[in-house]
Image: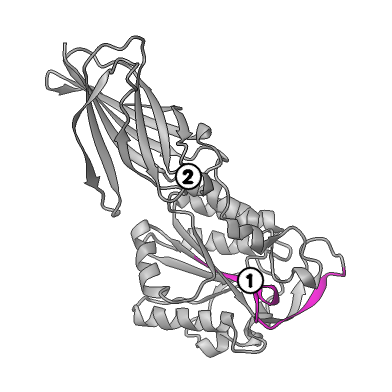
Amino acid sequence: MKGFVAQPPSTYWDALNFLLDRISTARYDLSVHRFSEEVGELGNTSAASILTPSFYSGKETSFPRLFEHIERETREEDIAVVVSDLVQSGRTGDQRALVSAFQKLTRKKPSVLLLAFRSAFQGTYFVEGRKILGSKIQLNLDGSAPDRARPFYVLLIAGSASGLDEARNLLLPDIGAAEQFEASKPALPLANVQFLPPNSEETPVWNAFKPAQKLPLKSGASVEVLSFLEISPPATEPTRLRLQLQCEGQCATGALRTPQRLLFQTERSSRKEGKWTAVTSSDSRAEALFSPDRKHLTVDYAFARPKAFSWDVYRVRILPGVANLRAPLWVDEWTTSEDGTPRLGQRTFKLDLFVEAMIRSIQEQVPLSEHYLLLGRGE
């Protein structure tokens, strides 16, 4: 890290200065920590001292100890801001140790945002992969172009989505990140749920009972409610219901690998004669396909037929499914599996592993859509 401040100004110098300024104007209570072999609070530390080479004098970088400290010491209302090149070094493990420690941290279900920057770097880089030219190499990157700059990252970890949104608005306007990845957001948001009636050759089973409506949530998002009344008995059971969900952008170019591996979490309760039954939950799969224009996802649900003179209410959460999300495209351009030569100095050693950990630990648990389906039946 010392090479980022060897010859200021640099993007690293500017970004860190920017963050410290915004923290002061936002009136956050600031606690600055240095992490190398251990994690220690520095007390009243000036920006000038943090931005000098002598500040970066540690012998190793221990992400396991850092993430353990964040998990142990921070409260839900706290915001942890980590500025680093995200390369684990020293006796506390390799990049896999970094990933494992981060996964333990995510048990508290934080909201996480990763900002990526490129900066000038002049100095020694300690090799963590194969020692092709030795255990360390010299980098002389002036920051004039992507292939002449070294990556560093700002990682924000908040106890809640609202806390992360507040930190984003107060600390990050115009900070100038080249790329970003927010694991706490849906990988492929699906909205505007619509009923697709059967074609003219099929006998319709369902008819829309009321227009779809949106219910706002405290997080600022919304869930959609659709209701249907049986107008003819189904030929077979379970009865089928086809819906269309609109993608933000084109479905096929998003992070989702295949719709066939989506996971549908459903909760069902029933109402008859003014009384509700207990809620039952299940994980099930529906048949899901991209539409020919790649702008929608078509889902065929299979539901049990409601009992006579009753309503069944389903809460449906569509999750990405296991190992069904790709990392953002920019990660491929920023990561490397080898770091032993100067020509790879503009990439981060095994960054893809860390981003994959963010996806598996956080984003796979974030629903792409949540909606309620009310299915009613007369006699």
Magenta-span inclusion, residue 152: yes
Q: Earlier in the sequence, mark 1 or mark 2?
A: 1
Splitting the image into 4 quarters, where does residue 133 fall?
bottom right
> Which residue is labeled 1 in the image?
151
Q: Residue at x 68, y 76 (%)?
A: 58
Q: Position of residue 257 (x, y in %)?
A: 56, 41
- Across and down, in percent, residue 244 comes to 36, 35
The amino acid sitting under disc 2 is Cys
Residue displayed at 58% across by 80% down: 12
Mark 1 surroundings within 10 Å by alpha-carbon count, few (fewer than 14), some (14 through 19), many (20 or more): many
Compared across the picture, whether 236 is left or right of 374 comes to right
Left or right: 357 with respect to 131?
left
- Magenta highlight range: 133-155
The image quarter containing residue 314 is: top left
Rendered residue at 28%/18% (across/down): 204
The image shows residue 23 at horizontal and vertical percentages of 40, 78
Q: Which residue is mark 2?
A: 251
Look at the image and tell me whether residue 374 can be seen. Answer: yes
Q: Is residue 153 left or right of residue 18?
A: right
Residue furthest out toward the left: 274
Alpha-carbon span between mark 1 and mark 2: 30 Å
